[in-house]
Amino acid sequence: MTKKQFKAESKRLLEMMINSIYTQKEIFLRELISNASDAIDKMYYKALTDDSIDFNQSDYYIKVKADKDSRTLTIVDTGIGMTKDELETNLGTIAKSGSLAFKKENEIKDGHDIIGQFGVGFYSAFMVADAVTVTSRAVGSEEAYKWESDGAEGYTIEQAEKATFGTEIVITVKENTEDENYDEYLEEYRLKAIIKKYSDFIRYPIKMDVIQKNLKEGSDNEWDEFTEEQTINSMVPIWRKNKNELTEEDYENFYQEKHYGFDKPLKHIHISVDGAVRYNAILYIPESIPFDYYSKEFEKGLELYSNGVLIMDKCSDLLPDHFSFVKGMVDSEDLSLNISREILQHDRQLKLIAKNIKSKIKSQLVSLLKEERDKYEKFYKSFGRQLKYGVYTDFSSKDDLQDLLMFYSSKEKKMVTLAEYVSRMPEDQKYIYYAAGESQERIEKLPQLELVTDKGYEVLYFTEDVDEFAIRMIPSYKEKEFKSVSSGDLGIESEDHSDSAKTDENEHKELFDSMKQLLSGKVKDVRVSKRLKTHPVCLSTDGEVSIEMEKILQSMPDNQNIKADKILEINLNHDVFQSLKHAFESDQEKLRLYTNLLYNQALLIEGLPIQDPVEFTNDVCKIMV
Ligand code: ADP
Ligand code: MG
């Protein structure tokens, strides 16, 4: 049996390829510039073995020219060029990569810069072009050839004139359509932006003739226009440089140039890994919060480069959510790309890099905390919330993050870490105590604090929404459990001299029962307080939901009316208690009045709304009269 070759409808194949593999038309310029860069690289390799070629870096460049009148865009390179045969095979065969073949023939291993590998990038020009002309003269050859195609109807090759080695590609840019603007590919500012975006680190200069203006002599509003040849790309991938050669300023300039932020970065992280996966990265911890950081619009991610060419400007898989504030770039030659040079979603290499980056960021933050406390606190002020959010939403990251948390301390009057707190705990202290409230000032006045602070224990202030939710995810830190000062049982020895409290409660059982009845539906229980010293009442909670959590849950748009199990605690040593007792014995209406007042006071202290403020003020008036 004879084996037959597959036939392909090349016209359709080309059309499909051109219009379905790329998500953005602008990348055609990236592809053509990458090819030009490859062509110059090949010259460089050839010069290594061929003495007749003298590779003088300054002779090698790429030039981009736009002409609005003829609607043409021209890309010139001084690279190795193509012979007639090469034009035929490389540009006449879809998926034939001369560059891949070159790498194989010359046994160029990884670690070199030749970008091409799929043999399709060139055709992306047809996304924006009605016709493409390639005039090329191979190095060492006297003849030049012109390859011409309109994309659909095949191509022609004919002899041509070309004075120098290299390739010139002329694209006739399509006319604008209703939903597509092609004119922009003839605009200087747009071309510059595309070059900067994707090809900034191509190692050869990418030049353009740029129109400049000078004030006319002796005038303050008339301008002289002139053109000047400028190099658009910065060429030097600083991430490939040795860390010792780079100054703080270099990193700051890179941060600004790449528009990672308008601020100065707080800290940079330069990573070069040469192991199971090879990559370089420059990451930054910004100093201030980007204006949209805590909004839905914010997109996390790092720039991803393959061999110095940008393939994705926000690769979100590279950063865990809790480090979403990190900016910067990653460059790796080990990524598996698909033919549109987009990264494969489930690339194993990418996962490895992400994992590695995560631990580097973590260890940098740990050392920032250790060595540059001021900076860390500044960082924490901006992004601490995000770390806590990470603890709350991502169970697997809590071990990573708990050492990075900080809270305001009642004792130190400043931010402290959990490790610092635990190291200071007196021996008889069982728990890590915290108090939640809207602000520091408000927490300081909470009656519930009295017993804990009287014992000399430190209390952490939780003033952000997420604090208590996050801490619930960390059952214990260094074997110490967390305890809210408002929780039913504080675990403090002295409160257990409270056999007396039990007797008190029994003694006044009927009073407490009727108060409980009066407040039915509002509190779960009325109890003798073991923690109050000077205040008459407070609220505490039983169970999972605290009062602060209730407030937050109630304020959410999809609130499911989750409530804390509230306990009204009464201080038996307060004079008010005598009045209560008296009312209970003689005047039920008065007892109702006092009970409601005390309950509402407790709500106010907690920053909770009073259900019926008018009734409350009327009640107060009744007492005054
Ligand atoms: P790839 O770059 O992935 O190989 P392309 O479709 O972009 O695929 O290009 C196909 C081939 O055409 C390249 O491999 C190269 O051999 C050749 N080629 C394209 N542009 C040039 C150029 N400017 N100079 C020399 N050769 C080129
Ligand atoms: Mg290419």
Image: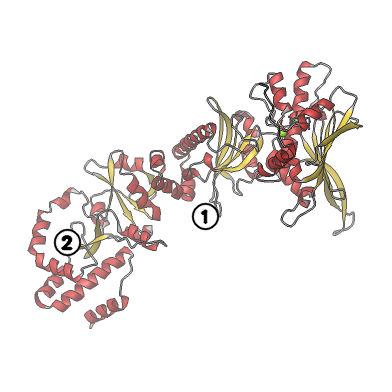
Count neighbours of disc 1 (C-alpha within 10 A) and say few if under 14, some if 14 to 19, many if 20 or more: few
Q: Residue at x 17, y 69 (%)?
A: 517
Q: Which residue is mark 1?
A: 296
Q: Are marks 1 and 2 in contact (CB under 8 Å)?
A: no
Secondary element at tag 2: strand
Give how far across and how far down residue 311 sits, in percent.
64, 39
Mark nearer the viewer, 1 or 2:
1
Q: Residue at x 68, y 31 (%)?
A: 118
Which residue is most to the front?
1
Lateral position of residue 611 relative to residue 263, left or right: left
State the mark number for residue 171: none
Q: Is residue 134 visible?
A: no
Image quadrant for the C terminus? bottom left
Mark 1: amino acid: Lys
Image quadrant for the N terminus? top right
Indicate how the structure is coloured in the image: secondary structure
Q: Which residue is mark 2?
A: 527
Q: How many marks?
A: 2
